[in-house]
Image (cartoon, rainbow, N blue to C red):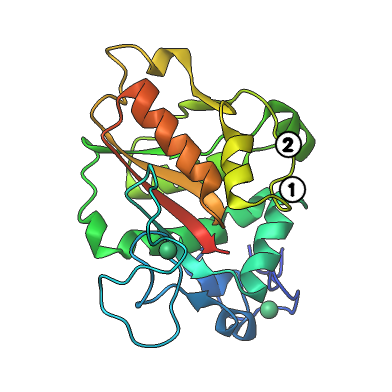
Amino acid sequence: MDVLFPRSCRVCDVPLEGHEPPEHLSHWLCPGCRRGLSPVEAPFCQKCGEVFDGAADSTFQCTNCAGQKFAFEFAIAGYQTTGSTLDLVHRFKYGSDLTLRAPLERMLERALRDPRLGDLDPQHWCLVPVPLHPLRERERRFNQSRELCRELAQRKDLPMLDAMKRTRSTPKQALLTRQQRLENLRGAFAVKDRFVRDDSPLRGRAVLLVDDVFTTGATTNECARVLKREAGVQKVVVISVARG
Ligand SMILES: [Zn+2]
Ligand SMILES: [Zn+2]
């Protein structure tokens, strides 16, 4: 296949040599762009996964999270949002390049190394993608979180339950304060009917809530709150490709 379709770096487009299997990031990215990736490594905030420059112990919480209550147990990303990571995510989302699902999912998998997650028993854990509003999804042609989730489910043999829907589109979050963001999102998400019932496959389960980029956590917090309240989910951990 490499002869017919020579590979090039998916960030900077330089031709790639060798025959790296698609399981490895080196199949997709040149050495330079791979060096431009910054994995999330300790110390990081035990709540929101924000990397901390300097020494801190394993119970460290960042100043943003101190005194804040999240509906999820914690959030963890594979990588920090540096240049190459952001380029990939943008090409995936806004360039509608579905093939980038593979390298981005490899980057997402890194989040599963967090020792707090343990072995991820598929009887207990399941994957739920953060939903996109139907209009936004039509525009983009797919929901990036669902695509990542699908690939992760396949590779890790975990059940995926596409259980949430976005019930209204919300104004852009970027210019709002944290409090305004939270209010802006109230009532924007719901659990799909068949996951609300008493025999919902979500009841008592632990959920890995999948998103592409974690920034303030306002969206995932609202999703976690709704999952627990409407579907009886026991706990929610947010995993994402990048920590913005
Ligand atoms: Zn490159
Ligand atoms: Zn934090």
In the displayed structure, 114 sits above or below 39; it is: above
Residue type at mark 1 is Ser
The residue carrying mark 2 has its beta carbon less than 8 Å from ligand 1: no
Q: Say which quadrant the N terminus sits in.
A: bottom right
Q: Position of residue 204 (x, y in %)?
A: 23, 28
Q: Nearer the viewer, residue 10 or 117?
A: 117
Local crowd size for mark 2, using a 10 Å CA cut-off: few (<14), some (14–19), many (≥20)? some
Say if residue 81 shows up in the picture: yes
For residue 77, the mark is: none
Q: x, y percentage for residue 179?
A: 58, 46
Of the image marks 1 and 2, the number of the one nearer the N terminus? 1
Query: Is label 1 in contact with label 2 (beta carbons under 8 Å)?
Result: yes
Amino acid type, mark 2: Arg
Label count reads 2
Q: Which residue is mark 1?
A: 96
Give the class, few, some or many, for how many residues have Cα within 10 Å of label 1's Cα (few <14, many ≥20): some
- Taking 18 as reference, is 97 left or right? right
In the rendered image, the quadrant that contains the C terminus is bottom right
In the figure, 48 relative to 50: above or below? above
The quadrant of the picture showing ligand 2 is bottom left
10, above or below 54, in the image: above
Judging by the rendered image, the residue that carries numbered circle 2 is 141
Report which quarter residue 89 is drawn in: bottom right
* Residue drawn at (25%, 39%) of the image: 122
Q: Is mark 1 within 8 Å of ligand 1?
A: no
Secondary structure found at label 1: loop
Residue 186 x/y as whole percent: 56, 31
Residue 147 visible in the snapshot: no
